[in-house]
């Protein structure tokens, strides 16, 4: 007898009949939704046919799924199809079990009501507090109890554009309901794709270990223009960066992805898809976004430099270089190092570097990666030999090198990770999230920072300061500004006294507060 897959509802692991056969796929893609109960509300849109696969995907990530329908939905999709999809009986009417309370009342067992698809009729009824169908009764109960609700609209575009429908969608959002999609095609406001819906569900129900933090990820290859037609680039596919961005999004971060392509998640809230081509484009975009990002209340923001960034650039010709020449000489110049530039923008940034080599011994690969940490330009480094696989492939073998390795060069502190790039991204973020949760250091390189009160300093007129203003032994009183020149209340934001302890030429990182803040220089 073959083993049956793991299932929490299976009281006897040796009895196959104890679990619905369609649930044997549970957790086949991960356990991120393990222990979560999701009710899918199905209404009378033709997009209801999509809910079978949607339920299956949620189950593959570990969720327990139920379906509740309107009468109109059952004219489009059969009850048996939804029973098959979820592995659970379908709720087509409310009975003496008071199912809406059973799932979403004060002691209800459900974690999320996902109404997919949601028609204009159902959206408007929910906004008005009308509950004359099983789905709207579930919605009224869930909203009243403060449970999570997501709505996925699907209808003809002309219906979606009705001012009252748009107003009702805004009303739902004002109640804290997430509206997913739609996307517009062929005159229809079509239901969002299942991949997007599942991604949003996982983010909503996940562990949120990166909530409140910004994660900046460089991905793929850069390209240096030779002339208006030709480029110097490399073979990097961007799959690793894309997988890392997805994982950071799932964990609740504000995600910034810098690359030469377009992400399928570019339209999502809290996901910033930023096109960059050259090394300088990428450096400028990354440092600008880091400087503008909110500082987390605790821990650190994160930069993951996963892009295969060119080490050289070339002077671009204004016109196409004529073809047919037997020889062509290009003069290459070294480019700036992105992570070194990022160090100057936020000194508390957690920096994760990538180091790719070919044909080196394993020990040598690890030592090369560790040198980046020892130099102070990265906190963690992901190393791999791309001679066989990694660049452009779907899977990879990598090693995560941390500061622990620098203590005694013990290879047991190096973490090997293998598998597809989604699996690698998830494992890497297990370590990154822990490190990023640690409080930012109060003593920065060549800077001594301490908290003072208003009586400890003599305030002078506020001036803007840059690194060129810094001289040896200069001291500043720092007043956190609200942007219009007014100083914030000292009780809310204590003054910070900073002293430069060595020459500016050795100042590798400068305080994040220096950019866009007001400073008073002491006499």
Image: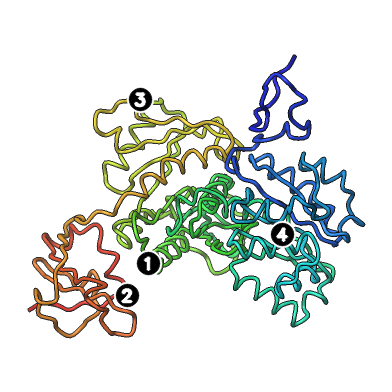
Query: Disc 1 vs disc 3: Cβ atoms closer than 8 Å?
Result: no
Q: Can you name the residue that lies furthest to the top here? A: 1
Circle 2 crowding by C-alpha within 10 Å: few under 14, some 14–19, many from 20: some
**Which of 172/260 is in front?**
172
Report helix, strand or loop for mark 2: loop
Residues tagged 1 and 2 counted as in contact (Cβ below 8 A)? yes
Secondary structure state at the residue bearing disc 4: helix
Furthest-front residue in this view: 96
Q: How far apart are marks 2 and 4 (CA)?
A: 48 Å
Q: What element carries label 1?
A: helix
* Left or right: residue 310 compared with residue 412: right
- The residue at the point 35 percent across, 58 percent down is 342
**Numbered mark located on residue 138 in the image:** 4
Which tag, 1 or 3, sits closer to the chain's start? 1
Task: Quickly name the residue at label 1.
Answer: 291
Q: Mark 2 points at which residue?
A: 516
Percent x, y for residue 367?
A: 33, 32
Q: Which of 287 and 490 lies nearest the eye of the viewer?
A: 490
Q: Residues within 10 Å of mark 1 (few under 14, many from 20)?
A: some
Residue indicated by mark 3? 412
């Amino acid at each position: 007898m073959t083993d049956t897959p793991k299932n929490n509802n299976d009281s006897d692991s040796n009895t196959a009949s104890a679990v619905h056969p369609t649930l044997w796929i549970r957790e086949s893609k991960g356990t991120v939704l393990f222990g979560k109960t999701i009710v899918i509300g199905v209404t009378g849109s033709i997009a209801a046919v999509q809910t079978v696969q949607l339920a299956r995907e949620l189950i593959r990530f570990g969720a327990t799924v139920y379906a509740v329908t309107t009468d109109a939905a059952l004219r489009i999709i059969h009850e048996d199809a939804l029973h098959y999809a979820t592995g659970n009986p379908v709720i087509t009417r409310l009975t003496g079990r008071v199912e809406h309370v059973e799932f979403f009342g004060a002691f209800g067992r459900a974690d999320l009501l996902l109404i997919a698809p949601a028609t204009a009729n159902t959206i408007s009824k929910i906004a008005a507090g009308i509950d004359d169908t099983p789905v709207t009764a579930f919605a009224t109960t869930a909203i009243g109890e403060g449970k999570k609700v997501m709505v996925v609209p699907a209808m003809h575009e002309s219906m979606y554009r009705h001012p009252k429908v748009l107003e009702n969608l805004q009303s739902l959002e004002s109640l804290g309901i997430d509206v997913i999609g739609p996307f517009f095609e062929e005159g229809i406001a079509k239901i969002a794709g299942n991949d997007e819906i599942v991604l949003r569900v996982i983010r909503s129900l996940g562990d949120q270990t990166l909530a409140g933090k910004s994660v900046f990820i460089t991905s793929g290859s850069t390209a240096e223009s030779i002339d208006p037609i030709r480029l110097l680039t490399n073979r990097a596919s961007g799959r690793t960066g894309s997988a890392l961005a997805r994982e950071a999004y799932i964990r609740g971060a504000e995600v910034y992805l810098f690359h030469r392509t377009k992400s399928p998640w570019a339209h999502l809230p809290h996901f910033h898809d930023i096109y960059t081509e050259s090394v300088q484009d990428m450096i400028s975009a990354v440092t600008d976004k880091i400087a503008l990002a909110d500082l987390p209340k605790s821990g650190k923001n994160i930069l993951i430099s996963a892009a295969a960034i060119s080490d050289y650039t070339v002077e671009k010709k204004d016109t196409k270089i004529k073809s047919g020449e037997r020889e062509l000489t290009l003069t290459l110049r070294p480019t700036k190092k992105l992570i070194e530039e990022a160090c100057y923008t936020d000194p508390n940034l957690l920096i994760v570097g990538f180091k790719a080599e070919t044909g080196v011994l394993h020990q040598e690969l690890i030592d090369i990666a560790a040198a980046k940490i020892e130099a102070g330009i990265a906190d963690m480094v992901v190393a791999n030999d791309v001679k066989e696989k990694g660049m452009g492939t779907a899977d990879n073998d990598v090693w995560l090198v941390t500061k622990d390795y620098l203590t005694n060069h013990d290879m047991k502190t190096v973490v090997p990770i293998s598998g597809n790039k989604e699996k690698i991204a998830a494992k890497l973020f297990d370590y990154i999230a822990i490190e990023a949760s640690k409080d930012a250091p109060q003593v920065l390189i060549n800077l001594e920072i301490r908290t003072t009160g208003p009586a400890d300093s003599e305030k002078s007129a506020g001036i803007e300061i840059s690194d060129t203003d810094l001289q040896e032994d200069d001291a500043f009183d720092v007043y956190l500004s609200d942007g219009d020149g007014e100083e914030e209340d000292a009780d809310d934001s204590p003054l910070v006294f900073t002293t430069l302890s060595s020459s500016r030429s050795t100042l590798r990182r400068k305080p994040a507060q220096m950019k866009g803040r007001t400073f008073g220089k002491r006499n």
